Image (cartoon, rainbow, N blue to C red):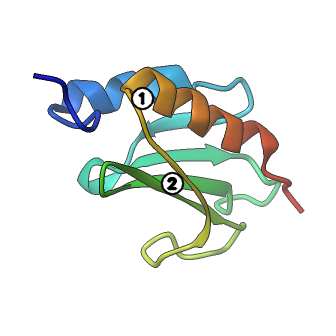
Amino acid sequence: MAKSSGFSSGGEIQRVIDAARSPEWSVGEGQKGQIMATRDSGEIGSPWVITAVRAGRGMRVFFYRPGDDVQFEGEAIGEISGNPREMGRQLRGYLEDTPLE
């Protein structure tokens, strides 16, 4: 009866998003169940972006610099896994710890 991943429903994606909230990032659901976080870069229309996309039992986390096309795979910076709350905490760690240079 135990679930192997946190993705049995769209509500669980929302739980990951809720746990990932960070004051400097705007976090929400992107296309096809991905999680997308954006942060102002100072350039209009070109934010910093971090996405999390389903991969196996968890999600892969990608980083995009201002001006990068998010339709393509970004720079892989890690993976998150576990229950939705733990995945959200792990994602928040990437949001807060990724150097923006």
Answer whether labels 1 and 2 touch (C-beta < 8 Å): no
| Label 1 sits on residue | 16
Q: What is the quadrant of residue 97 in the picture?
A: top right
Give the quarter of the figure containing the N terminus.
top left
Point out residue 52 in the picture as x, y percentages from the top left corner: 46, 52
Horizontal side, residue 99 vs residue 79: left or right: right
Instruction: Indicate the secondary structure of the residue bearing disc 2.
Output: strand
Q: Which residue is mark 2?
A: 51
Q: Amino acid at mark 2?
A: Thr
Q: Please identify the quadrant where the C terminus is shown.
A: bottom right
Circle 1 SS class: helix
Mark 1 and mark 2: Cα distance apart in space: 12 Å
Q: Position of residue 65 (x, y in %)?
A: 71, 67
* Coordinates of residue 60 in the picture (x, y in percent): 47, 58
Outermost residue on the front side: it is: 1
Name the residue: 68% across, 56% down.
47
Residue 88 is situated, as x and y percent measured from the top left of the image, at 51, 29
Q: Is residue 16 left or right of residue 8?
A: right
Q: Residue at x 50, y 69 (%)?
A: 70
* Relative side of 97 to 45, left or right: right
Q: Is residue 61 left or right of residue 42?
A: left
Between residue 47 and residue 51, name the one nearer to us.
Answer: 51
In this view, 2 is above or below 26: above
The three-letter code of the residue at mark 1 reads Val
